[in-house]
Amino acid sequence: MTTTTIAGVGRLHDSVVDATELPRIIQVTDNLYAAAFSLMKLLPARYIIDRAEAAGLLRPGSRIIETSSGTFALGLAMVCRLRGYDLTIVGDSAIDRDLRNRLEMLGATVEIVEYAGQSGGIQGARLTRVEELRRLHPDSFVPGQYDNPDNPGAYGVVADLIGETVGSVDCLVGPVGSGGSTGGLAAALRPADPALHLVGVDTHGSIIFGSPDGPRTLRGLGSSIHPGNVRHSAYDEVHWVTAPEAFHATHELFRNHGLFMGPTSGASFQVASWWAAQHPDSKVVMVLPDEGYRYQSTVYHAEWLREQGIEPAPAPGGPVTVDHPLDAPSAWTRLVWARRGFDDVMTPEVPDLGALAAPDAGDLAEPVAEVRP
């Protein structure tokens, strides 16, 4: 009988959170690697709760209130169920029936907020309701994924994993919503690789990088508010992608590489594969936030796509490069952000013409001709 020993097998995990919060690091092409999560937001959910417990902000039976319409809600619900905390999730219509069922099976209370013209769009309306609930329950804890520095702080362990497996990284590509994953990973990787090129992936209708607020078919990235955890000066490059392009890339990621992931992962793959092809000597890591099972009846379903009027298709020729966010067409667009602050990009400095010294009359090469009527 032959016995085969497999390195790394045999570790006993103390919970499903411990078993699934870290990504698989996968080489996709010669110079493109994936940090593929089952449920990425599980990691900051667990980390934020750990930090709150250590700070004495939580005790057995405490109430936790948070806004999310996606995977952060699910990650929190898993952690809260395991640790015995009451959880209220304030979301919107993006919480589909299947997700709501999972949240409620885990014991969460789900409140759906309708948009009624409030400042900050639907996310502003959700945050307003969270604040109302917090005032009703003054002993509650609000994780605050958009502004809590423990959100990006959670990704240090992922940076360590990338360093151990991939080594030095030239470029990191990932979707931007709360700013936790891309910002946290870049901050943790740059002490070893200061030149790391950070590419943020957003979508039209999101105001994070200066695009006008509007409806977003591609959900899970972008925002109608400016999250405090998005540090604009960390980004070297920003891309805005559309739903048809991102959905096509999501399908291609599965067809060609066997990675069954969600649409934000497809958006990340769309940009990262282009960037890796443009820079074949650079090592590129892309963040893939969650798996595709939640999207089988939508992004992976032909009838749903037809109902939405969406035909998944690639963008021929790659992105259009612009100099300002307001110049972005309704197609895949790229802007060299160059680690500038938000205001520096939106209102670039104009030279003070009055400060320029006027030339001396004697320095004029030619006399000024007299204009005759």
Image (cartoon, rainbow, N blue to C red):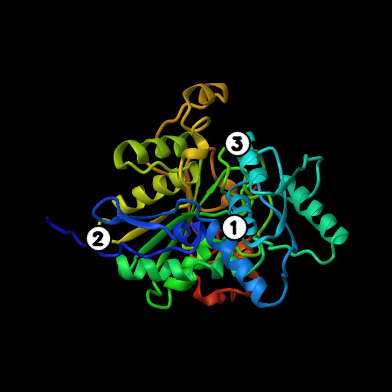
Q: Position of residue 72 (x, y in %)?
A: 60, 53
Q: Up-down: is 310 above or below 120?
A: above
The one nearer the camera, 47 or 307, is 47
Local packing at callout 1 (Cα closer than 10 Å; few below 14, some 14-19, many 20+) is few
Residue, disc 1: 370
Which-is-in-front pick, marks 2 and 3?
A: 3
Which-is-in-front pick, marks 1 and 2?
A: 2
Q: Residue furthest left?
A: 1
Local packing at callout 3 (Cα closer than 10 Å; few below 14, some 14-19, many 20+) is few
At label 3, which amino acid type do we have?
Asp
Q: Position of residue 357 (x, y in %)?
A: 59, 76
Residue, disc 3: 98
Residue, disc 2: 281
- The quadrant of the picture occupied by the N terminus is bottom left
Q: Position of residue 296 (x, y in %)?
A: 49, 33
Q: What is the secondary structure assignment of the residue under circle 2? A: loop
Q: Are marks 3 and 1 in contact (CB under 8 Å)?
A: no
Residue at image coords 78%, 48%: 125
Q: Position of residue 273 (x, y in %)?
A: 34, 48
Residue at image coords 56%, 53%: 324
Give the mark nearest the N terminus, 3 or 1. Answer: 3
Marks 2 and 3, how far apart at CA: 43 Å
